[in-house]
Image (spheres, rainbow, N blue to C red):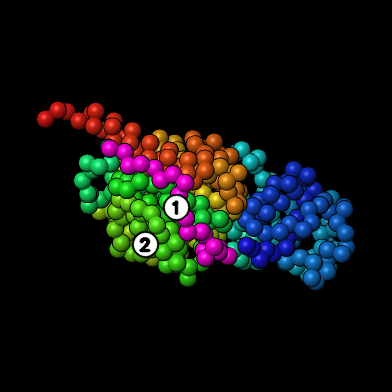
């Protein structure tokens, strides 16, 4: 659920107005008016009409009278945009949207997202994936050999829970979950995610070690990196961007910290476009980027944004994503075994 601020978009280009409106709505805000300056009704100037104006005019000289009126009459703050938006398929679009959203958050704050962790059902998954024989002979490792990033926002806990519930025992993967959520709910989220499955869960505070078969939830209060021994380390700084933890930053830090042991990333249900900057870079290194299918998401704008970059090689339900991961790891183990010389 969101307590969404009301935003008015004014642009003298229909396409620019559409891109601005889409970007604002994807973050969970309400766009209650989207028009060109010549068609704006005076009722929108009222004190209780809007929380923010977002204005983008390609020809300010043409609309000088309108701008004078807006500055004099509007009671809500005004955010003037400073550049034409690239198309949604342009490589620069995610960064343009991130800059816009950061400015909007500075003016009116983040949308208040309330995850109902108490209504995630207790249930046995429809089909827990059988443990492949390749998993049974794996010896414990001090440093995980495969680290996957899970990214989620609104609707993410239920989707990630379903994904984890399907995974078999002895899965040789460590997970780092970047979930947009209030810090006060992290311990509850741990309990929910590890309930009735083969995966244990913990908050990934400074000094914690990553291990196979575990999920470390990235902390909200500070950004983290990963040491050479695989332990989590606080950077002493806040997360970049408008939301914490930053999925983009977690993907990049796992890639930097684990190198060849960085397995891939999976984007689940959520608002916004967090992940759309780092995921293409990860895919360019040959690592898989997957996303939850739109029809199975509570909110699909986040995985859809990553899909639009062209880097997503597989989309599916949480159960299908779990099956895909198990098969991916099974193939990796078989390939490694075939390359090992006979004793």
Magenta region, main secondary structure: loop
Residue of label 2? 202
* Above or below for 170 versus 243: above
Task: State the residue at coordinates (61%, 38%).
Answer: 89
Quick check: can you spot residue 48?
Answer: yes
> Magenta stretch: residue 132 in it?
yes
Q: Where is residue 268 drawn, in percent x and y?
A: 51, 49
Give the extent of the magenta segment: 114-133
- How many marks do you count on the picture? 2
Mark nearest the camera among 1 and 2 is 1
Which is more toward the observer, 231 or 120?
120
Q: Quadrant of residue 271?
A: bottom right
Residue 27 circle label: none
Residue 124 circle label: 1
Relative side of 284 to 134, left or right: right
Dot 2 alpha-carbon crowd within 10 angstroms: few under 14, some 14 to 19, many 20 or more: many
Q: Earlier in the sequence, mark 1 or mark 2?
A: 1
Task: State the residue at coordinates (21%, 46%).
Answer: 139
> Magenta stretch: residue 19 in it?
no
Q: Where is residue 122 drawn, in percent x and y?
A: 47, 59
Quadrant location of the C terminus in the rendered image:
top left
Relative side of 131 to 75, left or right: left
Secondary element at tag 2? strand
- For the residues labelled 1 and 2, the Cα–Cα distance comes to 22 Å
């Amino acid at each position: 659920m969101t307590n969404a601020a009301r935003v008015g978009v004014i642009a003298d280009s229909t396409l620019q107005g559409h891109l601005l409106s889409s970007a604002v709505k994807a973050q969970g805000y309400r766009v209650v008016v989207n028009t060109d300056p010549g068609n704006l009704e005076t009722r929108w100037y009222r004190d209780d009409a809007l929380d923010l104006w977002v204005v983008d005019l390609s020809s300010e000289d043409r609309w000088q009278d309108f701008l004078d009126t807006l500055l004099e009459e509007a009671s809500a703050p005004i955010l003037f945009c400073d550049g034409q938006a690239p198309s949604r398929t342009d490589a620069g679009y995610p960064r343009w949207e991130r800059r816009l959203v950061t400015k909007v958050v500075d003016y009116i704050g983040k949308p208040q997202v309330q995850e109902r962790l108490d209504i995630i059902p207790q249930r046995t998954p429809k089909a827990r994936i059988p443990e492949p024989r390749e998993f049974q002979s794996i010896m414990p490792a001090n440093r995980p050999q495969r680290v996957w990033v899970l990214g989620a926002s609104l609707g993410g806990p239920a989707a990630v829970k379903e994904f984890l519930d399907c995974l078999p025992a002895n899965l040789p993967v460590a997970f780092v979950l970047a979930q947009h959520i209030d810090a006060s709910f992290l311990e509850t989220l741990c309990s929910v995610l590890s309930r009735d499955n083969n995966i244990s869960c913990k908050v990934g505070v400074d000094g914690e070690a990553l291990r196979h078969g575990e999920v470390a939830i990235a902390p909200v209060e500070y950004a983290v990196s990963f040491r050479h021994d695989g332990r989590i380390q606080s950077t002493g700084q806040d997360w970049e961007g408008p939301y914490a933890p930053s999925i983009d930053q977690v993907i990049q830090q796992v890639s930097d910290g684990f190198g060849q042991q960085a397995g891939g990333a999976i984007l689940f249900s959520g608002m916004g476009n967090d992940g759309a900057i780092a995921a293409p870079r990860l895919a360019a290194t040959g690592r898989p980027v997957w996303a939850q299918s739109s029809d199975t998401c509570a909110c699909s704008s986040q995985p859809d944004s990553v899909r639009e970059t062209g880097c997503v090689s597989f989309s599916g339900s949480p159960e299908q994503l779990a099956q895909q991961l198990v098969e991916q790891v099974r193939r990796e183990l078989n390939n490694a075994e075939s390359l090992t010389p006979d004793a």
